[in-house]
Image: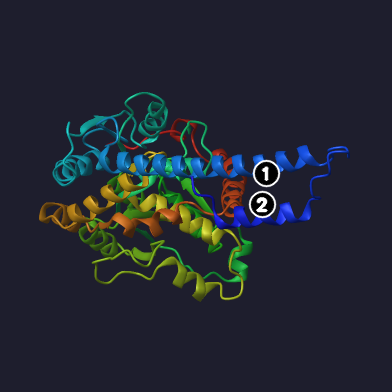
Amino acid sequence: MILPSYALNMMEKQEEDLPRLPHADQPRLFVMPERQFSRRMFLSTLLGSGAAIMAGTHTAHAEDSLSTSADSGSALIIGGATSSECGRWASLLAPALEEELHLSPPLQLTPTTGWDGITGANLFDTQQQTTPGPVGLMVPGTAILSAMLGGPRIHFDYRRWAPVFLVAQPSVAVGRVSLHQSFRARLTGQLTRVAVSKLTGPELTTVLALDMLGLRPQPVAGHATPEAAMATLQAGQTDVIQLPLDASYPSRIASLQAAGFTPLFINNARPDMQIHQPNLPPDLLTVLQQEHKYSQPAFLLPAWGAIAAACSLRAGLVLPALTQPDSIAQWRHAAEICANHPAIQQAALAENQTILAGTAGIPFYETLMPEPHVLMALRRWFAQSLPRWRDATPPALLSTPPTQ
């Protein structure tokens, strides 16, 4: 073993500093310390060099195994039924990913019960402890919204997942209210009734937006579909509804405008989401700047951005927390290629949805992970508002789920 130059120099320096060996008639002082130091220096240097070589060899073997091994398991859990939005995108995306990644065996689509995706997300994190675990999860944004609000059913940590393929679609608030209210109008305490599926549904984006505008929203639960919400608006039972910006939006908004209702603002949390619709209202950030130039909410605005992104997430393919980095890179590269397939592009364009594949979905997914003080502000606002909402909501409508 060849010693490093710094070890040899140090040994020579120590030998010069220590006393010379005494004569035969003198006691042999400092002899053992000198031998111990030299021997320890030699052994420590030898062991250090050997450990470095072994560590390098182990790292090389680990890199070789990462590049050649595949993730265990082939189950792709769907956060919902096969007929849900996540089920539809999983059926479209799975064959393309199998072809690009050369997966063997192929992906096994595993639908779950529940419309909000919480059951599938809990199952996804729970089965990571088994062998083999699921390879991925197709989750809707409603499950992430429930996690932000601290729901009691949440037993997963979406912050540890790795996003691969995201499908987003913003929404539009429609009604017959004035976004600009005078000080006298605010003192009257008039409520703005908002049609929602349930108090923790995706319409919470519009509810928080109206609260930031000072319109005192009052959710009216039990209206699961856009048609049901439109019926309550036309019947005068609600003042504002939320419509998805899908393929049916032009016909729906045309019928509402004929009845005197107007689109108020767009719930678009990220400017990189492309919207292919003419004659759209401004986004909420523009409306807030116009109506509240000097009184912007401190932490509720980024909180609204987080829940707006969650509610606009129609389906998202994510990988487990402990997935190897090279596997994540392979999946994201394959997702970028699959996003350019004609069938997948046509499916997104038909519903005015935006595909964020590969690394393009990382900024959007980071929006779903606000800072702790922002998350606490959101939960404080929700906890303070929930008792007032429940007092005005019939008990039978507090947990009415929307239909598939």
Q: Secondary structure at mark 2?
A: helix
Q: Residue at x 47, y 58 (%)?
A: 305
Query: Is residue 232 depicted above or below 360 in this figure?
Result: above
Q: Residues within 10 Å of mark 1 (few under 14, many from 20)?
A: some
Residue beneath disc 2 = 11
Residue sitting nearer the eye, 100 or 119: 100
Q: Quadrant of residue 124?
A: top left
For residue 198, side relative to residue 87 (left or right): right
Which residue in the structure is indicated by mark 1? Answer: 38
Helix, strand or loop status at disc 1: helix
Asked if the residue under mark 2 is in contact with the one under mark 1, i.e. CB atoms within 8 Å, the reply is yes
Q: Kindly identify the amino acid type of the residue bearing the numbered disc 2.
A: Met
Residue 139: x and y, percent? 34, 41
Q: Residue at x 50, y 59 (%)?
A: 210
Q: Is residue 309 above or below residue 382?
A: below
Q: Residue furthest top?
A: 130
Q: Is residue 188 visible?
A: yes
Q: In which image quadrant can residue 399 be found? A: top left
Quarter of the image with the C terminus in it: top left
Q: Residue at x 26, y 49 (%)?
A: 330
Foreground of the two, 268 or 279: 268
Percent across and percent down for residue 208 are 50, 55
Given the image, on which type of amino acid does mark 1 rest? Ser
Position of 73 with respect to 29 (left or right) is: left
